[in-house]
Image (spheres, rainbow, N blue to C red):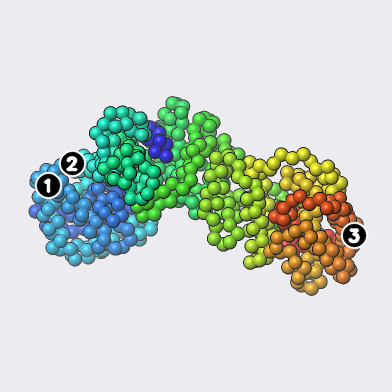
């Protein structure tokens, strides 16, 4: 990741070291509150600056001090924010880089601040209200200033001091070495620093196999970074956090564009320098379903522009990489988007809700939904799936199918009314995963008995259409049994306004014996209600024949059988509806119809 950040830094406009370190203020921090002091250090009051242009701001650790005399308000608590600001001013008053006259003035203002703290606090609170600060769309920042409202962070000496302090912090956190080799750029015989703080790649206080052991002054032996790379990475990381960081399905991530082609890098530099906000991902951007302005504008370059995708977790001062995709190609994103559109257009997966078609849409939330059978998703499984998806690497098909079936069973037990909807989602998800090669079935020749098993009916044609899943006679039998069960449950509901027959299979893992019993009992129920005519010339003989052909040969797992059965149960009516075929039988609606 350090390498990718360093590569991206080469595609950003060249700037001075202090400009690289300047984080500035986010757009919604647009209310500046200046604490103004006279030439003798006397308190003048709070004045408001609308906007954030020209602000020099570099944050420090949450429980420490910022590098510049300018602080964000983290909520309405003025006491903590002003205390943090005063600590930053104290550091300036003791810095030799600041001339003596200004240090004396800063000391005088600090004395005034301590003496009139309550008055200043009240003035700040009133100014926040008057400025329209709501801590959402309009947030506030506070800074030290003179009686002309000229900010202290605007002093030229502050810029040099900022660079010096940050570099010194590198040495303080992980030791330094006057002459070493940088692990990022490879330059030798240069000053290097260890445990680089912007993105610490190891912990000095935790056990681990690191070369420098647990002594801070030897940390430069673990992952040494030179000062130039450190500043470039700091700048690039701030840029990435601002524009290239987002979230999907609860997973925070950032994308780092890179290219080996000089013309692409130059074009990237020009575009990012001119209008970086155009490529901002925003707070929520689903890479599976949403287009990216960056890859769209560079479409003419094909895969010469690639993305490094990093899933991370940030909590307080901790920043941890959770998963990475070293190379996410635009062509891969195109494949994913095209497959998602194909699934959304699939007529068999469309349901009707309130008079409107509801297609199955594959998004990152689909992956999250099926990552666990419980209401609490599995963060690890979700990241594993997303990482494999974007990297174009297959996952274990059996594990994937297990997750889908577990979710279907759990849904049947907790809320059976959602089973048909969840089945459409699961079946669409399976087909999507197969299409994008997230799951790759073992190569297999067509079973010798398949032609004898598949009936000449709408259901048989559906099986042939999805032959990549229905690859064995057992799966056809399970599917047809599900269609049969849908007919029985629908008839029973019309007769009794209830369907106790469905309780025999909803929320259960189905074995071969269970499926055989459902067929026998379902046949008996239809006979009891005098409705065998619904199936006697079509589905019943087709299913009976399929069982005969299958005989004792049963080589599929219970999860595969359950999935095939549930597809038949939930989609039987839709399949017949799409065929528009009524072969002398009365068309009946299943529970989802």
In which quadrant will I find the N terminus?
Answer: top left
| CA neighbours of label 3 inside 10 A, class few (<14), some (14 to 19), many (20+) | few
N-terminal of the two: label 2 or label 3?
2
Query: What's the CA distance linking mark 1 and mark 3?
Result: 98 Å
Whether residue 314 is visible, yes or no, is yes
N-terminal of the two: label 1 or label 2?
1
Q: Secondary structure at mark 1?
A: helix
Give me the disc on residue 157. Answer: 2
Residue with the mark numbered 1: 102
| CA neighbours of label 2 inside 10 A, class few (<14), some (14 to 19), many (20+) | few
Q: Secondary structure at mark 2?
A: helix
Give me the disc on residue 160. Answer: none
Residue ID at (29%, 45%): 215
Query: What's the CA distance linking mark 2 and mark 3?
Result: 92 Å
Residues at discs 2 and 3 in contact (Cβ within 8 Å): no
- Residue lying farthest to the bottom in this orientation: 496
Q: Secondary structure at mark 3?
A: loop
N-terminal of the two: label 1 or label 3?
1
In which quadrant will I find the C terminus?
Answer: bottom right
* Residue 200 drawn at (x, y percent): 35, 45
In the image shown, does 207 or 107 lie closer to the viewer?
Answer: 207
Image check: 471 left or right of 42? right
Q: Where on the picture, by quarter, is residue 336? A: top right
Image label count: 3
Q: Nearer the viewer, mark 2 or mark 3?
A: 3
Q: Where on the picture, by quarter, is residue 109? A: bottom left
Image check: 298 left or right of 584? left
Residue with the mark numbered 3: 536
């Amino acid at each position: 990741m350090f390498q990718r950040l360093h590569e991206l830094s080469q595609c950003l406009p060249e700037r001075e070291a202090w400009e690289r370190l300047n984080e500035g203020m986010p757009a919604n921090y647009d209310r500046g509150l200046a604490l103004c002091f006279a030439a003798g250090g006397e308190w003048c009051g709070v004045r408001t600056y609308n906007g954030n242009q020209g602000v020099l701001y570099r944050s420090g650790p949450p429980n420490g001090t910022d590098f510049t005399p300018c602080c964000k308000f983290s909520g309405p608590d003025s006491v903590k924010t002003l205390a943090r600001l005063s600590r930053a001013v104290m550091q300036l008053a003791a810095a030799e880089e600041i001339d003596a006259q200004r240090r004396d003035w800063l000391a005088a203002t600090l004395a005034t601040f301590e003496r009139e703290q309550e008055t200043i606090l009240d003035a700040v609170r009133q100014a926040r209200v008057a400025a329209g600060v709501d801590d959402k769309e309009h947030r506030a920042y506070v800074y030290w200033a003179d009686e002309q409202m000229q900010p202290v962070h605007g002093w030229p000496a502050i810029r040099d001091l900022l660079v010096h302090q940050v570099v010194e912090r590198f040495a303080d956190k992980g030791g330094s070495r006057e002459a070493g080799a940088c692990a990022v750029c490879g330059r030798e015989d240069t000053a290097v620093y260890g445990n680089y703080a912007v993105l610490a790649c190891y912990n000095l206080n935790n056990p681990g196999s690191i070369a420098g052991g647990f002594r801070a002054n030897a940390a430069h032996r673990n992952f040494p970074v030179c000062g130039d790379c450190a500043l470039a990475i700091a700048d690039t990381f701030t840029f990435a956090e601002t524009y290239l960081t987002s979230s999907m399905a609860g997973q925070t991530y950032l994308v780092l564009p890179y290219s080996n082609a000089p013309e692409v890098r130059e074009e990237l530099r020009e575009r990012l320098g001119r209008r970086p906000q155009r490529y901002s991902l925003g707070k929520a951007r689903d890479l599976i379903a949403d287009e990216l302005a960056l890859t769209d504008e560079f479409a003419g370059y094909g895969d010469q522009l690639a993305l490094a995708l990093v899933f991370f977790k940030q909590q307080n001062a901790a920043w941890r990489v959770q998963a990475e995709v070293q190379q996410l190609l635009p062509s891969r994103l195109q494949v994913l988007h095209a497959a998602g559109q194909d699934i959304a257009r699939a007529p068999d997966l469309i349901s009707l809700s309130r008079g409107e078609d509801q297609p199955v849409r594959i998004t990152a939330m689909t992956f999250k939904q099926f990552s666990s059978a419980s209401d609490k998703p599995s963060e690890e499984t979700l990241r594993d799936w997303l990482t494999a998806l974007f990297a174009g690497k297959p996952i274990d098909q059996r594990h994937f199918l297990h997750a889908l079936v577990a979710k279907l069973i759990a849904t049947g037990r907790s809320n059976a009314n959602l089973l048909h909807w969840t089945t459409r989602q699961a079946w669409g998800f399976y087909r999507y995963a197969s299409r994008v090669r997230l799951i790759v079935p073992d190569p297999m020749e067509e079973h010798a008995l398949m032609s004898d098993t598949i009936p000449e009916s709408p259901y048989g044609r559906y099986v042939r259409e999805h032959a990549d899943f229905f690859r064995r006679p057992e799966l056809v039998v399970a599917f047809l049994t599900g269609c049969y069960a849908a007919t029985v449950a629908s008839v029973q509901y019309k007769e009794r306004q209830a369907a106790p027959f469905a309780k025999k299979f909803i929320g259960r893992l189905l074995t071969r014996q269970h499926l055989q019993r459902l067929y026998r009992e379902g046949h008996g129920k239809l006979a009891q209600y005098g409705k065998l005519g619904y199936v006697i010339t079509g589905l019943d003989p087709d299913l009976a024949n399929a069982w005969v052909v299958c005989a004792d040969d049963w080589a599929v797992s219970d999860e595969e059988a359950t999935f095939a059965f549930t597809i038949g149960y939930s989609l039987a009516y839709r399949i017949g509806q799409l065929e528009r075929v009524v072969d002398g039988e009365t068309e009946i609606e299943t529970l989802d119809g």
